Amino acid sequence: MKKKLPILSAMLFFSILSVTFFASCDKDTHSYLDVKVVDAFTEKAISGAEIWIHQTGGSIDIHGVTGSNGVYSHRFNAPANIEIEAKLALYHLDSAYTPPMMVIDGYRTQSTSARLVDGETVTRVIKLP
């Protein structure tokens, strides 16, 4: 019995040590961004808006599109300072073509910035004029 006590103590010590070590490895080192695009006047979500995300002097250059709920989400591998631009094309029917076709007449744009932090979700709402 006396020989089993040190072995049991060592087993208990190493099991507590391993649980503590692996629990500390579970820290989320990703950063998350949610961009919601809404109409500035009606406050309604805009689906199909283009989202451009850039990091000045960095390696981030991302393009996405908002879903039916007006939101675009992205996961990043590291914290960063970023610039976010939302852009929605304005179309008109041009009858100079046969058959008539929709052509881009301009854009509604707006931008903002964000600081991404490990393990956190940053949310930005962009109101397009």
Image: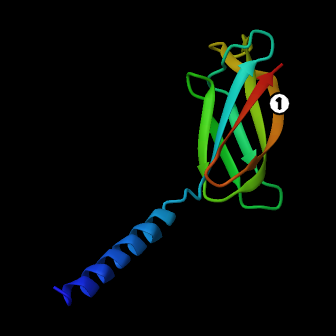
How many other residues sit within 10 Å of disc 1, few (<14), some (14-19) or many (≥20)? some
Q: Position of residue 92 (x, y in %)?
A: 74, 14
Looking at the image, which is closer to me, 39 or 93? Answer: 39
Looking at the image, the residue that sits furthest to the bottom is 3
- Number of numbered discs present? 1
Picture residue at 63% right of the left edge, 39% below the top: 64
Picture residue at 82% right of the left edge, 61% below the top: 57
Residue 16: quarter of image: bottom left
Picture residue at 61% right of the left edge, 58% below the top: 77
Q: Quadrant of the C terminus?
A: top right
Left/right of residue 45 with respect to residue 11 in the rendered view: right
- Against 7, residue 45 (above or below) is above
Q: Position of residue 79 (x, y in %)?
A: 70, 57
Q: Given the image, on which type of amino acid does mark 1 rest?
A: Gln
Left/right of residue 13 with respect to residue 103 in the rendered view: left
Looking at the image, the residue that sits furthest to the left is 1
The residue under label 1 is: 110
Q: Position of residue 5 (x, y in %)?
A: 24, 83
Q: Position of residue 29 (x, y in %)?
A: 59, 59
Looking at the image, which is closer to me, 63 or 3? Answer: 3
- Against 104, residue 19 (above or below) is below
Looking at the image, which is closer to me, 38 or 4? Answer: 4
Which element is circle 1 on?
Answer: strand
Looking at the image, which is closer to me, 72 or 123? Answer: 123
Residue 33: quarter of image: top right
Looking at the image, the residue that sits furthest to the front is 2
Q: Quadrant of the N terminus?
A: bottom left
Q: How is the image coloured?
A: rainbow
